[in-house]
Amino acid sequence: MTKARDIMTTDVITLAPETDIIEAARVLLDNGINGAPVVDEEGKLQGLLCQSDLVVQQKKFPLPSVFTLLDMIIPLSSTRQLEKEVSKIAALTAAEAMTKNPVTVDPDTDLETIAALMVDNNFHTLPVLENDRIVGVIGKEDVLKTLFATPPKNGSE
């Protein structure tokens, strides 16, 4: 059975939390990757910065929907969600724009679990951790490459 260690990229491109947003975007684009782990000086994972985290900066400022009832203003959107969106739109560093506490896998996670995580949660990049350290990263392309190595089903050649 195929495991994360079999398909992960071990030459991981990482970002520092203080990396400027423009530089972070350049790193992702220049390397043709969708996301990069954000790690501290000790190499510990702080978050994951994906292209979608950067695209949100082009979004208009979200105005909360409210309605009035008996002279009370009642917000229809979560204040916490609004604050999160505003901080991502205004982010200047990788730490401000990244997704904190990203879902990770370990080297022994099987391919089916990895595929399910990606499909069910619309993830494009999964950091691979061993002993709380980045040992690899798996992108959708890594999963797709396994299609070429898998023998055809139903006995057809």
Image (spheres, rainbow, N blue to C red):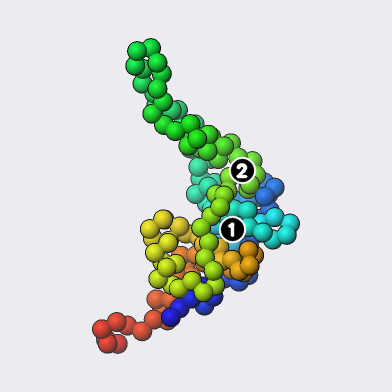
Q: Position of residue 75 (x, y in %)?
A: 41, 25
**At x 57% / y 49%, what residue is drawn?**
100
Neighbours of disc 2 within 10 Å: few (<14), some (14-19), many (20+): many
Q: Quadrant where the N terminus lies?
A: bottom left
Tag 2 residue: 96
Out of 149 and 116, give the one closest to the viewer. 116
Q: Is residue 36 left or right of residue 18?
A: left
Amino acid type of the residue tagged 2 in the rendering: Glu
**At x 55% / y 49%, what residue is drawn?**
99
Q: Is residue 126 left or right of residue 67?
A: right
Outermost residue to the top? 71
Q: Is residue 78 above or below residue 140?
A: above
Q: Quadrant where the C terminus lies?
A: bottom left
Q: Which mark is residue 149?
A: none
Q: Earlier in the sequence, mark 1 or mark 2?
A: 1
Q: Is residue 83 above or below residue 149?
A: above
Q: Is residue 19 above or below residue 119?
A: above
Q: Position of residue 12 (x, y in %)?
A: 62, 66
Looking at the rendering, which quadrant does residue 150 occupy? bottom left
Amino acid type of the residue tagged 1 in the rendering: Ala
Q: Position of residue 30 (x, y in %)?
A: 60, 59
Q: Is residue 27 left or right of residue 155?
A: right
Tag 1 residue: 36
For label 2, the SS is: helix
Callout 1–callout 2 Cβ contact below 8 Å: no
